[in-house]
């Protein structure tokens, strides 16, 4: 039996074609894919930045939501179950895995980047990486569980608690979700963003926004009575933000680097020294972050539906990528199968 899939053909090019429906190997379930999110990583792939990891003819897609067609006996899953898939495959033996940081395994392989992902009608995925989605979570919301798990992880790693303050640089999908997770925790949060469409969306979600009209440093100063925020998240990937992110944090506060900075950029290390700041990276997620993300989305504690700007068919992946790169009025784009 044949199915449709999208194939990466090198920088700037995706094609849709047909290929045989995969046969699940030992421990694998056959899934019918329903939603696949397009994210910043996928845009890097589209631009050819990850050609050392993604082969020509490869299938991307790591933000997947699917329905079980058949599952291995004893896996706990049955036909019709709705699931998301953790895309990280780790060795289980290296130092990172031994420490519990399996999602940062020294031999880490990400499905949808290093290995084939979910941008196709049917997908054979390891059952042990599947997590069940409750009926209360609809299909589009389920398509946003992966980026929400990223946000949950970032906030947890930063050690934020009720009553703390946080400033998020960048109100794209991840920055917005970080702010919503903060808000739900009772953290006082503001987002620095320049794109007018995104500013409107952030405000409609009840979030405080620092727009173009205000200097971010002055805002942070006034907002915290000159003390500085407990945590600042760098989610823009823009060197201009990296340059000032240490300036808005209080003594012993935390700077969390969430964005991908592919090149070294200037950072004010004097402020890091003078206030004894902690700088930490936040990259992926672990199982407990997924479970918390599902709980937050299913209970509507974090409203994810407004973030979906557009749904496109698989055949429009090329155009969807081009539009997402254009930086227009777009938040999250989902491929609907
Ligand atoms: Zn992603
Ligand atoms: Zn490992």
Image (cartoon, rainbow, N blue to C red):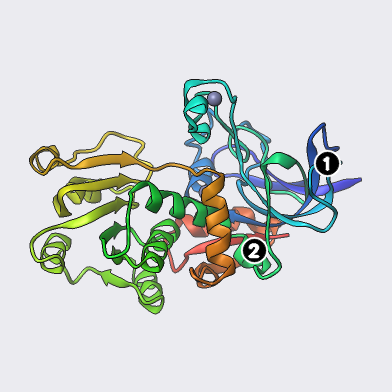
The residue at the far top in this view is 94
**Mark 1: secondary structure:** loop
> Which residue occupies 45% across, 60% down?
173
x, y percent for residue 271: 11, 43
Q: Earlier in the sequence, mark 1 or mark 2?
A: 1
The quarter holding residue 212 reads bottom left
x, y percent for residue 154: 40, 49
Residue 35 position (above or below residue 60)? below
Taking the image as drawn, is residue 65 in sight?
yes
> Which residue occupies 61% across, 53% down?
318
Disc 1/disc 2 C-alpha distance (Å): 36 Å
Q: Label 1: which residue?
A: 74
Q: How many marks?
A: 2
Residue 35 position (above or below residue 103)? below
Q: Specify whether tag 2 is near ligand 1 (CB below 8 Å).
A: no
Q: Nearer the viewer, residue 28 or 202?
A: 28
> Which residue occupies 50% across, 32% down?
100
Q: Is 271 displayed left or right of 331 in the figure? A: left
- The image's mark for residue 312 is 2
């Amino acid at each position: 039996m044949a199915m449709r899939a999208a194939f990466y053909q090198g920088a700037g090019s995706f094609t849709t074609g047909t290929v045989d429906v995969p046969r699940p190997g030992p421990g694998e379930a056959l899934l019918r894919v329903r939603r696949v999110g397009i994210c910043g990583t996928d845009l890097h792939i589209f631009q050819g930045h990850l050609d050392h990891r993604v082969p020509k003819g490869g299938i991307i897609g790591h933000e997947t939501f699917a329905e079980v067609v058949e599952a291995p006996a004893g896996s706990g899953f049955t036909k019709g179950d709705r699931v998301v898939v953790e895309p990280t495959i780790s060795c289980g033996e290296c130092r990172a895995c031994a420490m519990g940081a399996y999602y940062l395994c020294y031999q880490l392989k990400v499905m949808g980047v290093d290995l084939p992902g979910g941008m196709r009608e049917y997908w054979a995925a390891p059952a042990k990486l599947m997590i069940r989605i409750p009926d209360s979570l609809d299909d589009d919301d389920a398509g946003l569980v992966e980026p929400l798990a990223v946000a949950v992880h970032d906030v947890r790693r930063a050690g934020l608690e009720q009553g703390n303050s946080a400033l998020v640089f960048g109100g794209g999908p991840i920055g917005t979700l970080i702010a919503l997770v903060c808000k739900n925790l009772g953290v006082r949060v503001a987002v620095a963003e320049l794109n007018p469409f995104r500013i409107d969306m952030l405000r409609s979600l009840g979030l405080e926004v620092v727009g173009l009209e205000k200097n971010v440093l002055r805002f942070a100063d006034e907002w915290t009575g000159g003390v500085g925020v407990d945590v600042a998240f760098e989610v823009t990937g823009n060197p201009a933000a990296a340059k000032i992110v240490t300036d808005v944090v209080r003594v012993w506060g935390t700077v969390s680097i969430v964005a991908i900075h592919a090149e070294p950029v200037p950072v004010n290390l004097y402020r890091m020294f003078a206030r004894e700041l902690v700088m930490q990276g936040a990259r992926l997620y672990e199982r407990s972050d997924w479970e918390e993300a599902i709980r937050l989305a299913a209970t509507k504690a974090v409203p994810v539906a407004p973030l979906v700007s557009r749904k496109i068919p698989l055949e429009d992946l090329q155009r969807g990528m081009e539009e997402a790169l254009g930086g227009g009025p777009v938040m999250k784009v989902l491929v609907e199968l």
